[in-house]
Image (cartoon, rainbow, N blue to C red):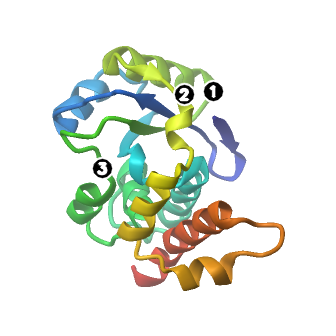
Amino acid sequence: MQRRLEEYGKIVEITGFRNAHIKDARSFSQILAGKLPTDCEVQFFDADLVATWQHLYFAVLNALMNLKSNRGISNSIAVETVLYASAQRQILKAINFIGLKPDSENAAMVVICENAESAKAGLDAAAKLVGAQLDESVLELTETKAKRIRKVFDISDEEINVAKTRSVGSEQALVDLVVERVALLSTRL
């Protein structure tokens, strides 16, 4: 899924990899950084903790807004994105919370670039290096994934029930609550 963020002059590509098995995310990211266009940043996530592409999209938006207003914890869009996606204020906690772990099977990836050509080149470089099947379906919610997300983001049955309306089911209510936690991080920075 690719989106243009006109206000920030960025293109965001959000995708997933099935059976990625990246054992050392830090080393992998360093190798990948050398293969990316200079105007791109990439961040990987444990896809089993991502509440659809919307979760990551709003994390990117919040990160860009925070950096634009000079309130970021870091100077990196990728690092700010992981902070927002995890709803954590500390970088190490955020990475440990939602980043790839040695036993992560499925990976979510965000590529943030200045133009569509760079975003495609960044996606291609990452896909080649990961060596796993590109599969956006790892971003979708399953019952097992929803239970895990509810647990780690501490979302109660009561919150889900309050967030549901006649037109929004439990799944969208969960996504909305995760996105709300993403947005609320800026009030705690």
Task: Tell me whether the residue at label 1 lies in contact with that at label 2, contact meaning CB atoms closer than 8 angstroms.
Answer: yes
Q: At which x and y percent is residue 133?
A: 44, 19
Label 1 – label 2 distance at C-alpha: 5 Å
Question: Relative to 127, does residue 140 appear above or below in the rendering?
Answer: below
Q: Residues within 10 Å of mark 2 (few under 14, many from 20)?
A: many
Q: Which mark is residue 157?
A: none
Please name the residue that numbered disc 2 is placed on. Answer: 119
Rendered location of residue 56, percent (x, y): 52, 52
Q: Are marks 3 and 1 in contact (CB under 8 Å)?
A: no
Q: Which amino acid type corresponds to the residue marked 3 in the rendered image?
A: Gly
Seen from the viewer's position, the closer of residues 76 and 32 is: 32
111 vs 148: above or below: above
Residue at image mark 1: 116
Query: What is the x, y in percent for residue 85?
Result: 44, 59
Q: Earlier in the sequence, mark 3 or mark 2?
A: 3
Dot 3 surroundings within 10 Å: few (below 14), some, or many (20 or more)? Answer: many
Q: Residue furthest right?
A: 167
SS under mark 2:
helix
Mark 3 and mark 1: Cα distance apart in space: 25 Å
Give the residue type that dot 2 points to. Answer: Ala
Report helix, strand or loop for mark 1. helix
Find residue 5 and report its horizontal and vertical position in percent.
Answer: 67, 47
Who comes first in sequence, dot 3 or dot 1?
Answer: 3
Residue 125 visible somewhere in the drawing: yes
The kind of residue tagged 1 is: Ala
- Residue under the image location 28 percent in, 60 percent down: 97
Reading the image, the residue beneath label 3 is 99
Secondary structure of the residue carrying tag 3 is loop
Q: Which residue sits at x=58%, y=66%?
A: 174
Q: Can see residue 112? A: no
Query: Relative to 124, is 89 on the left or the right?
Result: left
Quarter of image, res 32 = top left
